[in-house]
Image: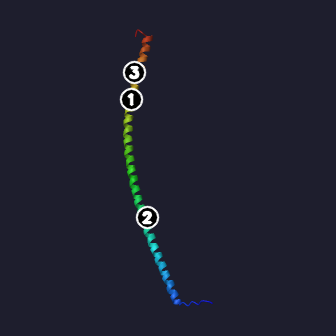
Amino acid sequence: MSIIIETDLKELLIQINGKLDKLSGDVNELKVSVANDINELKVSVTNDINELKVSVANDINELKVSVGKLDEGQKGINKRLENVEFFNRSILAGIIVGIILGIMKMFFPNI
């Protein structure tokens, strides 16, 4: 007992073409969806990069300001150190002169 199925080849071709058209439409929808997702990612990445550039530029400006303040502080400290060195040399010279005069007075009391 065998079952004989009679189907018109034209009907099969129409069904196959319909399924192919549906698959083609699905593939096209996927392509469009993927393209949209890629564009959204590109925009998102571009925005993130721009935000990072702005953030880095702000950080660089803050660092430049900090370096400027440090330079001013260093100049002030250098000036104070120069003054201290001058006073120390003056005091040391006075002490040396005093010691020499004391020694001279000790060895030559008549002078």
Numbered marks: total: 3
Q: Residue at x 38, y 41 (%)?
A: 71
Marker disc for residue 37: none
Q: Amino acid at mark 2?
A: Leu
**Nearer the N terminus, badge 2 or badge 3?**
2
Q: Is residue 51 above or below residue 106?
A: below
Q: Amino acid at mark 1?
A: Val
**Nearer the N terminus, badge 2 or badge 1?**
2
Say what secondary structure mark 3 lies in.
Answer: helix
Is 61 left or right of 1, judged from the image as shown? left
Name the residue that disc number 3 marks: 94
* Contact? badges 2 and 3 (CB < 8 Å): no
Q: Dot 3 surroundings within 10 Å: few (below 14), some, or many (20 or more)?
A: few
Task: Choose top left, top right, bottom left or bottom right for residue 50.
Answer: bottom left
Where is residue 64? Give x, y as percent. 38, 47
Q: Residue at x 39, y 29 (%)?
A: 84
Question: Distance from label 1 to label 3 (Cα)?
Answer: 15 Å
Is 22 left or right of 73, judged from the image as shown? right
Marker disc for residue 84: 1
Q: Who is closer to the viewer here, 62 or 72? A: 62
Q: Amino acid at mark 3?
A: Gly
Name the residue that disc number 2 marks: 41
Task: Choose top left, top right, bottom left or bottom right for residue 72.
Answer: top left
